[in-house]
Image (spheres, helix red, strand yellow):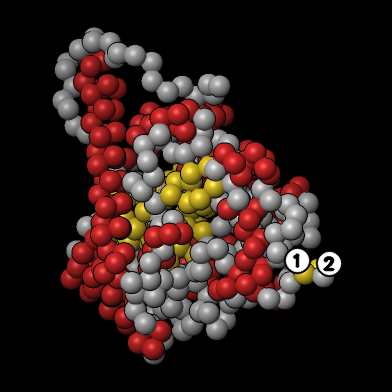
Amino acid sequence: MSTKPFEPQFMKVGVLTAALQELTPREIRDPDPDRAIEDWLAFAHELGADYIQLAAALHPSESDIPAEAMLDPAANTLDLREPFNESRAKRVRAALDEYKVGLSDVGYFDNLLHHDPAIRKKKHDFMLRTFDAAQMLGVDAVCGFVGRNQTHSMDQNLDDFTEHFIPLLKEAKKRGLTYRVEQCPMPGWTTGDNFHNNIAYTPGTWIALHKICEKHGVGDQFRIHYDPSHAILMGQDTRSIFQYLKDEGYNFLIGGFHVKGQVTHSKGVSAWGYGGQTIQRGDWKNGQPSENPTDQSNAWLKQTVLAEHELPGTARHDPLAYLQNRTVDWLDHQLAARQLLQLDVSNTHLVVEHEYPPARIQDKEKLKPVLQGSIAFVRKIDEAAACMYALQNEVLPSLGIPVQGRGREAYRS
């Protein structure tokens, strides 16, 4: 056996444009919608990001959920009040070239199984516009949620997925796109008691949904955009999830990553357990859901009482927390991805998603060094993991040299 060369493969590091929703003031971008994309590409260049994940969302004037009711208000950096066209695409492509920043994909995160047919149609129509924009901009994927029909059980939602989501995947297939699902359970999406409001929240449902997709000829269109923060919220760890997918023959499902952590508050878990705060949150008034959007935002205590989002690099290094699955072990996350998943590593995107509340600064110059530091941290962690993987899994085995120690193990308690 010949000695294998040392050739580490690095992932592509980017940032979701929702990190700064109002980079371009409304009075400027509403009449000139593509200015927001140009400004974000210039900002991404300053941050040292190689790519942006372009956030699309219903315009605040069209959304069915008021911004005051959201944990993280959506960013419509890609404004689709008017359909995207070739003229707009040419302008965006010119900015991509000017700032030497790429586009990983387009993200539209909404409930696509909404129980109200009129609201669901509005969201689906917008998603189709998102598909069209993605195709015109030359990307191969759109990222989003599946959602949940709140009037149905989880099993019934599999039928809803077949009826309402499969047609979207067929439209994605026509355009040569993959739909990558972020697995956030969205516990505070409504004032109801459901914790899992995005049915594609865990590997068990990913596999069930993919089997439905295969039956309808769109298995290749359904992939996962894995975010470890949501695994932490449910007491899971990355390595065990990836191992489970490999054991089940589905380690091809993950096609991209959000790098966002979650730091679990042990006191909150002690008070409420992993089901989150179930009573007296403040989202109900006089025995019924409050009509005040600010009150409705208290529904997110189902999640925030347990944990707080982490912008990578901003949480203290805590090996004990890693062992207890209370925060993300970023180095092992990147190692496990290489060891256990079927990835084209050098064409896989790592997208920094900023939702750390104290640092959600809507001021470009103040936020800039925060994002610069986080993006640099993500890049260096990925480079370190790539070097360890190449050395331990390629170079040393080719020389018959054993790797030292055991490392973190899946399913270990």
Q: Is residue 390 visible?
A: yes
Task: Determine which of the numbered discs, if any, sits on residue 284 in the image.
Answer: 1
The vertical placement of 316 against 308, above or below, is above
The vertical placement of 362 against 9, above or below, is below
Q: Is mark 1 on a helix, strand or loop?
A: strand
Q: What element carries label 2?
A: loop
Q: Is residue 342 visible?
A: no
Quadrant in the rendering for residue 146: bottom right
Viewer-closest of 357 and 213: 357
Query: Percent x, y for residue 197?
Result: 66, 55
Task: Determine which of the numbered discs, if any, sits on residue 287 in the image.
Answer: 2
- Alpha-carbon distance for marks 2 and 1? 6 Å
Q: Split into 4 quadrants, where in the image is the N terminus? A: top left
Residue 374 in the figure: left or right of residue 249: left
Residue 206 in the figure: left or right of residue 328: right
Viewer-closest of 281 and 193: 281
